[in-house]
Amino acid sequence: MTTQTQSQREHFWDALRAFLMLLGIPYHVALSYQPGQDFIVHSGEGVTGFSQFADALHLFRMPAFFVIAGYFAMLLLAKREPMAWLKGRFLRLGIPFLTCILTLVPAMNLVCELSNLPAPEALRSWRENSLTSGGYWVRHLWFIIVLLYLSSGTAFLAQRFPSVRSGLVPRSIDDWASRHFVLTLFGLALMIGLWEALALEAFYSLGLASMLPQQILRLDETIIYLPWFALGCVLVRARLSLEQATRLSAPVALVAVAGTALWLIVHKDVAPMTERFIGTFAALAATQVLIAAARTLLDRQIPLVRKLTDASFVIYLFHLPLIALFVWLAQPLPLPPVVKALAIMALSFGLSYAIWGVIGRIRSMSLLFEGLTVPRRVPLAT
């Protein structure tokens, strides 16, 4: 099977990436209604189980997303010149990023302050944090920064070493890995777990958890997700292993469930290095299960899935500002918090989807929020 044929046939990769982005809605609503814990927006109430639900989503959502991002990067570099592809990445991701940090994020931050403080104090806090906090500007858009780093590194490697664009994992290695897939998967989990446990601790021990390297440049997140992105890149070049990775495996599913349960039980009580190590096994197993399930269920043209796939990026940009607004407005409503949370999930999704529909009809808005010079509906990866 050629790379071209793969890109045409494997619809489930786009669908799974969109699903992971849309999971940001229940994830951020759950954070907003954690019992006894405040998120960036203050709800003043909580729903039992939402903390664990948010933790479980966070465990696998972004690792799986970056595996898919690496997969698409290497798939597309086989067809396009590296620098032309990278320019497209900066247009498609960079323009919406700049647009949002100048419009949506400041408005969202003001709403968050108003949910916590009386209006005069909220405005003072908003001004102060806007001038002094790097993370205040980035918020939920951090993944774009990391994705541009990783895309740049991959493009420069492909430019310097042309074999990166078309080479395959040696047949003997790919064959062995595919025949011992579960063992290979957990060997990879061991390596990624050690990387996250040791490299991230080194980052913190060097005193780099400060405004520029952490809050603005997001170097710690880059360290975390580099191996996941690299795994996706390699997967494209290991065809036999890729076939195994897209098949459901009972042992892997068992590890995904048991590992997630163990991590949820112990992650707040063990050292950070241990927590990251355990979490990596659960996250990698869950990622494989998601990929295999997506192939089983979504590897065909489904009009509704296609629309959600096209809309997912804009939905992600808008969902958190809308969630913050609705959580703030819902504070005085005499409703059970679980009802508020479910309603906010539905409203945030519905309104974000409607906004996507409007943006696609206006050339300037399509450029600013989708990075498209011509309004059209195409996958974000192209």
Image: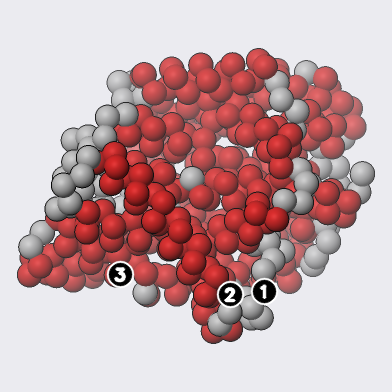
Q: Which x, y percent locates residue 131?
A: 23, 70
**Can you name the residue that lies furthest to the right here?**
1
Q: How crowded is mark 2: few (under 14 residues within 10 Å), some or many (20 or more)?
A: many
**Can you name the residue that lies furthest to the front here?**
334
Identified by mark 2, the residue type is Gly
Distance from the alpha carbon under mark 1 to that under mark 3:
28 Å
Task: Read off the residue under disc 2.
Answer: 360
Q: Name the mark nearer the viewer: 2 or 3.
A: 2
Q: How crowded is mark 1: few (under 14 residues within 10 Å), some or many (20 or more)?
A: few
Question: Which numbered marker is on residue 106?
Answer: 3
Task: Read off the residue under disc 1.
Answer: 376
Q: Which of marks 2 and 3 is nearer the N terminus?
A: 3
Q: Which x, y percent locates residue 125?
A: 14, 65
Q: In which quarter of the image is the N terminus?
A: top right
Asked if the residue at tag 2 contacts the one at tag 1, i.e. Cβ–Cβ closer than 8 Å, the answer is yes
What residue appears at the point 27 percent right and 29 percent down from the top-left corner? 48
Residue 297 or residue 147, whichever sits in front: 297
Q: What element carries label 1?
A: loop
Q: Please tell me whether residue 88 is drawn above or below residue 286 in the rendered image.
A: below
Q: What element carries label 3?
A: helix
The answer to whether residue 65 is visible is yes
Identified by mark 3, the residue type is Pro
Q: Which x, y percent locates residue 376?
A: 67, 74
The answer to whether residue 223 is visible is no
Q: Residues within 10 Å of mark 3 (few under 14, many from 20)?
A: many
Asked if the residue at tag 3 contacts the one at tag 1, i.e. Cβ–Cβ closer than 8 Å, the answer is no
Q: Please tell me whether residue 215 is drawn above or below residue 52 in the rendered image.
A: below
What residue appears at the point 77 percent right and 58 percent down from the top-left corner? 76
Q: Which of marks 1 and 2 is nearer the N terminus?
A: 2
